[in-house]
Image (cartoon, rainbow, N blue to C red):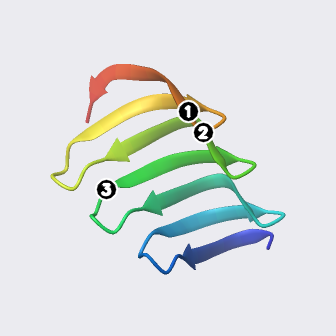
Amino acid sequence: MDGQGVFTWSDGKKYKGGYLEDKKNGTGEFIWPNGKRFTGTWIGGKADGKGKYILPNGDTKVGEWRDGKKVKENDEHL
């Protein structure tokens, strides 16, 4: 798939956003069944760039990811 789309896994996880060659790419949001979310940029199916991790209670942490791993957590909390 290329373009925008939504994929929902059987366990309730969901991704909404950009795809390139069937992988998460561009801007998108990953949502877990318990309500936590990650909104940010993706490259090759992995979080890569700036993003926000939003907990079910509304707390938000901002950071940077490279190749799917958090490399920096900004001091700012939204």
Mark carried by residue 3: none
Residue drawn at (52%, 76%) of the image: 9
The vertical placement of 68 against 73, above or below, is below
Image quarter of residue 76: top left
Q: Report the number of numbered marks.
A: 3
Image quarter of residue 77: top left
Residue 41 or residue 65, whichever sits in front: 65
The residue to which callout 1 is attached is: 69
Q: How far apart are marks 2 and 1 (CA)?
A: 4 Å
| Residue 2 relative to residue 57: left or right | right
| Residue 21 relative to residue 16: left or right | right
Quarter of the picture holding the C terminus: top left
The vertical placement of 30 against 3, above or below, is above
Q: What residue type is labelled 1?
A: Lys
Mark carried by residue 68: 2
Q: Which amino acid does label 3 sit on?
A: Lys
Residue drawn at (37%, 55%) of the image: 37
Are the residues flagged by discs 2 and 1 in contact, CB closer than 8 Å? yes
Q: What residue type is labelled 2?
A: Gly
The residue to which callout 3 is attached is: 36
| Residue 42 relative to residue 54: left or right | right
Name the N-terminal-most of marks 1 and 3: 3
Q: What element carries label 2?
A: loop
In percent of width and height, residue 6 lies at 58, 76
In percent of width and height, residue 14 lies at 48, 70
